[in-house]
Amino acid sequence: MSGHGVKGETAAAPPTLDRLKARIRGYGSGRAVVAFSGGVDSAVVVVAAARALGTEHVTAVTAVSSSFPAGEVGAARAVASALGVFHRTVDTHELEREAYARNDGMRCFHCKTELYATLRRLPELLRDGAAPHAAGDAVILAGANADDEGDFRPGLLAAGPHGVRNPLLAEGVGKAEVRAIARHLGLPVAEKPALACLSSRVAFGIRITPELLARIDGAERAVRRLGFDPVRVRHFGERMTIEVEPASVERLLAHPSLPALLQELRVGGGWSDVDVDPEGYRPGSMNATLVNVGPAPARRSRTGGGGPAHQEADGEGR
């Protein structure tokens, strides 16, 4: 598809989207690769890049590994198709990194390092055999937004060394404004719940394995089948808790299928203690289990990447 529009677009660009387009053009590359989870943040970045550079110059890339929830690859592919850009997947191997698998406070840094190194090796990033960091390369874009500032996001530290740019963060665009842009443009993911990798469900200090992540993924899908989303299954070893939206906790507790589900998770899931968290879903709640994290990441200025003080997001692209 040619031109500078997104497939099916009818809505005029909000001023914030114009700023994002200008920011992306200012990176100085005529092509972009977007770390694309299929969520609303990375979808808005794809739209901005497509309008700034043309859909034929944008590739949405979804990284696939044991930490990516089952079923999300197909959803990401469908969103990319709706946006009119080329989509591809890459395999990443963060669980093979001991620094990741041991699950300390810098786990996300090692995950993003694996992701960005993989994206840097993509053929789409090279022009006429140029070196990976040559000026003619495609820019790598990711979906960190302004709300990520002030939280513990060690994964963001991996952006600068790999030249990854975060236009939402650079322009001070938070989650509410991202969703407002998505609604204005009629994007299919405007109301999609936040997505984070499955490893974010595991208490820090407990080793990450493919088998553990598969157990967590299966448990979350079982709760979703009861009609709840978002869902987080938090793993504390022998104990597991289920988080749903705070307003939905009472509905889950009263659900007639809950007792059977809890028993299934105890017997088949391998947890001896399974409960519904009465406080409900709280993004970042596992940060309370941080151990041996070392110094906290430095706060970032809003340039959106390209230096040791710049970070990436908590699940966009993962």
Image (tube, rainbow, N blue to C red):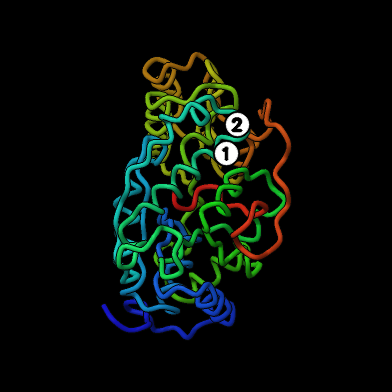
Foreground pick, 297 / 44: 297
Q: Height in image: 4 above or below 309? A: below
Q: Amino acid at mark 1?
A: Val
Mark 1–mark 2 contact, CB under 8 Å? yes
**Residue 78 falls left or right of residue 11:** left
Tell me where residue 62 appears, x and y as whole percent. Answer: 36, 52
| Neighbourhood count class around disc 1 (C-alpha, 10 Å): few under 14, some 14–19, many 20 upward | many
- Where residue 194 is drawn, which disc sits there? none
Instruction: Residue 251 in the image: state x and y as whole percent.
Output: 53, 40
Residue 10 is situated, as x and y percent measured from the top left of the image, at 39, 84
| Amino acid type of the residue tagged 2 in the rendering | Asp
Q: Which residue is mark 2?
A: 277
The residue located at (45%, 73%) in the rendering is 29
Categorize mark 2 by other alpha carbons within 10 Å: few (<14), some (14-19), many (20+).
some
Give the mark nearest the N terminus, 1 or 2: 1
Q: Residue at x 52, y 58 (%)?
A: 164
Looking at the image, is 288 positioned above or below residue 51?
A: above
Q: In x, y percent, where is residue 44? A: 48, 67
Picture residue at 34% right of the left edge, 40% below the top: 70
Q: Which residue is mark 1?
A: 249
Q: Quadrant of residue 257?
A: top left
Element under label 1? helix
- Give the distance between the C-alpha atoms of the residues marked 1 and 2, in whole angstroms: 8 Å
Q: Nearer the viewer, residue 126 or 215?
A: 126
Q: Secondary structure at mark 2?
A: loop
Q: Quadrant of residue 259?
A: top left
